[in-house]
């Protein structure tokens, strides 16, 4: 499903998978439930392989890094002087990561 979405979120393949999500995932009284064939490890590993195949983790790292930079800068404005050097180093490393991307 994630591979189809990464290919084209409006394609028929994604829509077919999307229609089956309620068969696989649903919200119960004790939280999100996943229909499994008895091996959560197997389900997790296959889902992880699918996500990695889409290239989404790399994009997610970029988005998360940008969000963390914004959070650090907001924190720095709210609490000037508190762990200022650590924040500056972290922001500089994050910017360097994004520049390489």
Image: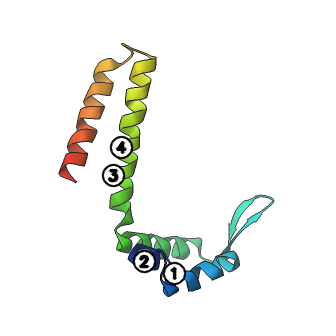
Residues under labels 1 and 3: Cα distance?
A: 24 Å
- The residue wearing badge 1 is 14
Q: How is the image coloured?
A: rainbow
Q: Position of residue 51 (x, y in %)?
A: 43, 70
**Is 20 located above or below residue 30 in the figure?**
below
Q: Secondary structure at mark 2?
A: loop
Q: Nearer the viewer, residue 41 or 67?
A: 67
Residue placed at 37% from the left, 61% from the top? 57
* Circle 4: element type: helix
Circle 1 — which element?
helix
**First in sequence: mark 2 or mark 4?**
2
Q: Looking at the picture, how far across and down is residue 32, in whole percent?
A: 69, 62
Q: Earlier in the sequence, mark 1 or mark 4?
A: 1
Q: Nearer the viewer, mark 1 or mark 3?
A: 1
Marked residue nearer the N-terminal end (2 or 1)? 2
Instruction: Identify the disc placed on residue 62.
Output: 3
Dot 1: few (<14), some (14–19), or many (≥20) neighbours within 10 Å?
some
- Figure quadrant of residue 74: top left
Q: CA distance from mark 2 to mark 4?
A: 25 Å
Q: Residue at x 81, y 59 (%)?
A: 29
Q: Is residue 37 visible?
A: no
Residue in the picture at 59% in, 78% down:
18
Q: How many marks?
A: 4
* Separation of marks 1 and 4 at Cα, in angstroms: 28 Å
Q: Dot 2: few (<14), some (14–19), or many (≥20) neighbours within 10 Å?
A: few
Mark 3 residue element: helix
Pointer 4 residue: 66
Chain-order first, disc 1 or disc 3:
1
Q: Which residue is mark 2?
A: 8
């Amino acid at each position: 499903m994630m591979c189809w979405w990464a290919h084209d979120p409006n394609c028929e393949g994604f829509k077919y998978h999307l229609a089956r999500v309620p068969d696989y995932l649903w919200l119960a009284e004790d939280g999100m439930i996943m229909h499994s064939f008895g091996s959560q490890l197997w389900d997790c590993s296959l889902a992880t392989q699918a996500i990695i195949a889409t290239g989404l983790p790399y994009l997610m790292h970029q988005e998360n890094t940008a969000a963390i930079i914004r959070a650090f800068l907001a924190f720095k404005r709210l609490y000037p002087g508190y762990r200022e050097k650590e924040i500056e180093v972290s922001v500089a490393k994050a910017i360097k990561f994004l520049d390489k991307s």
